[in-house]
Image: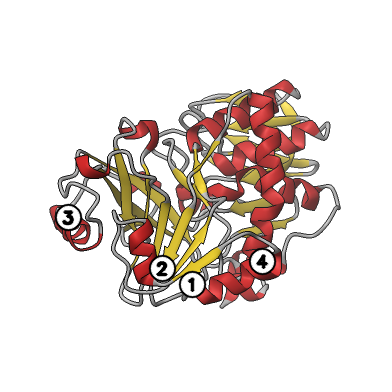
């Protein structure tokens, strides 16, 4: 029977990051992945996620700053850039540009706030109704490439990866845990990190957690989100296309250059957390609803004059949300839950594993907002 000191369940962004940081610190690490790293049935596939600094909560802006040098280190390790700088725009009446600017000012991050008319003159491919925050260091990160890079980095430090490995049961034993897949010999581990993304609700009942810890866990909502790629209109094909976050009281949306997923010829756009609720990732079907497609076309017609309003590609992805949209990093007697999705976790990818490794090694505590009982996950 194989035995390791640290077992990581899930090899998406969160799990691969954790394996990398644990392995580079000299720990014995085994990753178990039910499919393949960055599988299309998880939350870490594709080449286009937004990297940005603006948050109304300065905690997250500070964490992006901590992640930035780790992005540079990871890019150096894999020998290719993982973030393409495009600049980023934030607008809408839910989170005013001025509120975001105050946080960036406090953290010393370059930015500017433009009136709607000035923003329309600079970026005529978009329509703006409110003041706009411009942050020049925002960009598009390659999620799938990031996962591959972190897995390779972990393996270079001795970590092992096993794919097509589905956890059937986890059993507490005297010196750790036995993890069963129902097909072969179990794996023994002294410590386990659960980084299962949208599969977490299905996995939680199989874990030997204390009643108190289980009761303190927030509700994890998994949704199947829908994203659409719209081609650049010929008149704007050579324009500068930044990332765009629009947060209105009625809805929230995000848009970004679509990367290699759809041939680099259009903008990827989606509503934020507007998808179909699932009991877990096992229920996903990859279908796009006609109503969502029509609604998005209407959004393009009204707010994106630089795009042709007919999608040329579309896809689904998974969100795993807590009620507060904060992350969860907390443990119970050798089992650590890492749920760092909530639709905005990718930008923190190389930092997530460092936070977990610090926690397991007795280093700096993770932010209270991420711990059970902290003000974030319980509100």
Q: Residues within 10 Å of mark 3 (few under 14, many from 20)?
A: some
**Image x and y of residue 84, in percent:** 51, 38
**Image x and y of residue 167, in percent:** 53, 38
> Residue visible at 57% across and 62% down?
111
Question: Image check: 19 left or right of 183?
Answer: right
Q: Is residue 203 something that shows in the picture?
A: no
Q: Determine contact: label 3, label 4, CB under 8 Å.
A: no
Residue at the spot of label 3: 297
> Residue visible at 57% across and 65% down?
326
Q: Residues within 10 Å of mark 2 (few under 14, many from 20)?
A: many
Whole-angstrom CA distance, mark 2 to mark 4, is 20 Å
Q: Is residue 154 something that shows in the picture?
A: yes
Residue at the spot of label 2: 91
* Of 372 and 40, the residue lying toward us: 40
Residue at the spot of label 4: 59
Of labels 1 and 4, the one closer to you: 1
Helix, strand or loop at label 2? It is strand
Residue at the spot of label 1: 97
């Amino acid at each position: 029977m194989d035995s390791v000191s640290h077992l990581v369940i899930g090899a998406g962004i969160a799990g691969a990051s954790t394996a990398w940081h644990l392995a580079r610190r000299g720990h014995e690490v085994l990753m178990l992945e039910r499919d393949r790293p960055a599988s299309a049935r998880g939350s870490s596939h594709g080449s286009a996620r937004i990297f940005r600094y603006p948050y109304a909560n300065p905690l997250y802006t500070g964490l992006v700053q901590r992640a930035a040098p780790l992005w540079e280190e990871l890019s150096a390790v894999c020998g290719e850039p993982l973030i393409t700088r495009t600049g980023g725009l934030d607008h809408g009446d839910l989170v005013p540009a001025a509120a975001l600017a105050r946080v960036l000012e406090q953290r010393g991050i370059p930015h500017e706030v433009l009136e709607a008319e000035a923003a329309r003159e600079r970026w005529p491919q978009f329509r703006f109704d409110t003041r706009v925050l411009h942050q020049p260091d925002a960009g598009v990160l390659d999620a799938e490439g990031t996962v591959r890079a972190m897995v390779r980095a972990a393996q270079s430090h001795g970590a092992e990866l096993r794919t097509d490995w589905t956890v059937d049961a986890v059993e507490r034993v005297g010196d750790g845990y036995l993890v069963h897949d129902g097909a072969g010999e179990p794996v023994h581990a002294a410590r386990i990190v659960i980084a299962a993304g949208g599969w977490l609700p299905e996995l939680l009942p199989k874990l030997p957690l204390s009643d108190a810890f289980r009761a303190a866990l927030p509700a994890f909502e998994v949704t199947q989100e829908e994203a659409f790629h719209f081609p650049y209109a010929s008149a704007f094909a050579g324009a500068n296309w930044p990332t765009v976050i629009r947060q209105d009281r009625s809805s929230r949306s995000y848009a970004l250059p679509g990367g290699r997923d759809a041939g680099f010829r259009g903008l990827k756009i989606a509503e934020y957390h507007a998808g179909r609720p699932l009991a877990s990732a096992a229920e996903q079907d990859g279908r796009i609803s006609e109503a969502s497609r029509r609604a998005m076309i209407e959004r393009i017609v009204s707010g994106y004059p630089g795009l042709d309003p007919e999608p040329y590609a579309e896809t689904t992805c998974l969100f795993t949300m807590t009620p507060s949209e904060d992350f969860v990093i907390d443990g119970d007697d050798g089992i650590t839950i890492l749920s760092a999705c909530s639709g905005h976790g990718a930008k923190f990818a190389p930092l997530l594993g460092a936070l977990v490794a610090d926690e397991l090694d007795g280093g700096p505590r993770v932010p209270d907002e991420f711990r059970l009982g902290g003000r974030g996950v319980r509100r």
